[in-house]
Image (cartoon, grey):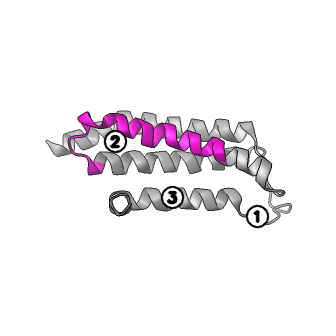
């Protein structure tokens, strides 16, 4: 466990923050002029940030990542999507002040996929070029 704390400190902090934000009771925001669907944008950004940081720390920590690249696909794509689904189910059935929403899950998945595309086409080539 200490290995993961040393190698992925920012990712773990973001994961803990997302879990906290998913279960705390938010204050009422009736007087704030927000646009419809602002929560979907927040979900997209939370999970996009989480997956992006996981990709960044993985690529930074594994210089010869070609042999273990499948770990990144599991850890930075499948795990955040599974975590978001589990959190949505727990919000629906274990809280009275939150409700699980499949559109939130879709926004979470979209954020993870957007971060993955960015990591694959921007971060990965940049880090590979930086290594040479």
Residue closest to the eye, 126 or 93: 93
Left of 103 or right of it: where is 51?
A: left
Magenta part, dominant SS: helix
Asked if the residues shown at circle 3 and circle 2 are in contact, with their CB atoms under 8 angstroms apart, the answer is no
Q: Position of residue 24 (x, y in %)?
A: 71, 63
Spatial CA span between label 3 and label 2: 19 Å
Look at the image and say whether residue 25 sits in the magenta stretch: no
- Residue at horizontal 36 percent and vertical 39 percent from the top: 71
Spatial CA span between label 3 and label 1: 19 Å
* Part of the protein shown in magenta: 60-86
- The residue beneath circle 3 is 14
Q: Is 109 drawn above or below residue 98 in the view shown?
A: above
- Residue at horizontal 52 percent and vertical 40 percent from the top: 112
Which of pointers 2 and 1 lies earlier in the amino acid sequence?
1
Q: Secondary structure at mark 1?
A: loop
Asked if the residues shown at circle 3 and circle 1 are in contact, with their CB atoms under 8 angstroms apart, the answer is no
Residue closest to the eye, 66 or 27: 66
Residue closest to the eye, 73 or 33: 73
- The residue beneath circle 1 is 25
Q: Secondary structure at mark 3?
A: helix
Left of 47 or right of it: where is 116?
A: left
Tell me the quarter of the picture where residue 16 sits: bottom right
- Residue at horizontal 27 percent and vertical 41 percent from the top: 126
Which of pointers 3 and 1 lies earlier in the amino acid sequence?
3
Q: Position of residue 95 (x, y in %)?
A: 79, 56
Mark 2 neighbour class, 10 Å CA radius: few under 14, some 14 to 19, many 20 or more = some
Which of pointers 3 and 2 lies earlier in the amino acid sequence?
3
Q: Position of residue 39 (x, y in %)?
A: 71, 49
- The circle on residue 123 is 2
* Residue found at the far left of this picture: 132
- Residue at horizontal 36 percent and vertical 48 percent from the top: 56
């Amino acid at each position: 466990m200490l290995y993961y704390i040393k190698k992925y400190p920012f990712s773990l902090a973001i994961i803990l923050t997302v879990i906290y934000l998913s279960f705390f009771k938010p204050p009422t925001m009736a007087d704030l002029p927000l646009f419809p669907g602002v929560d979907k944008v927040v979900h997209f950004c939370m999970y996009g940030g989480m997956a992006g940081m996981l990709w960044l720390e993985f690529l930074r920590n594994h210089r010869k990542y070609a042999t273990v690249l499948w770990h990144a696909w599991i850890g930075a794509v499948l795990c955040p999507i599974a975590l978001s689904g589990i959190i949505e189910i727990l919000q629906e059935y274990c809280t009275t002040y939150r409700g699980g929403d499949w559109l939130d899950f879709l926004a979470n998945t979209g954020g993870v996929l957007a971060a993955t595309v960015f990591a694959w086409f921007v971060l990965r080539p940049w880090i590979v070029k930086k290594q040479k």
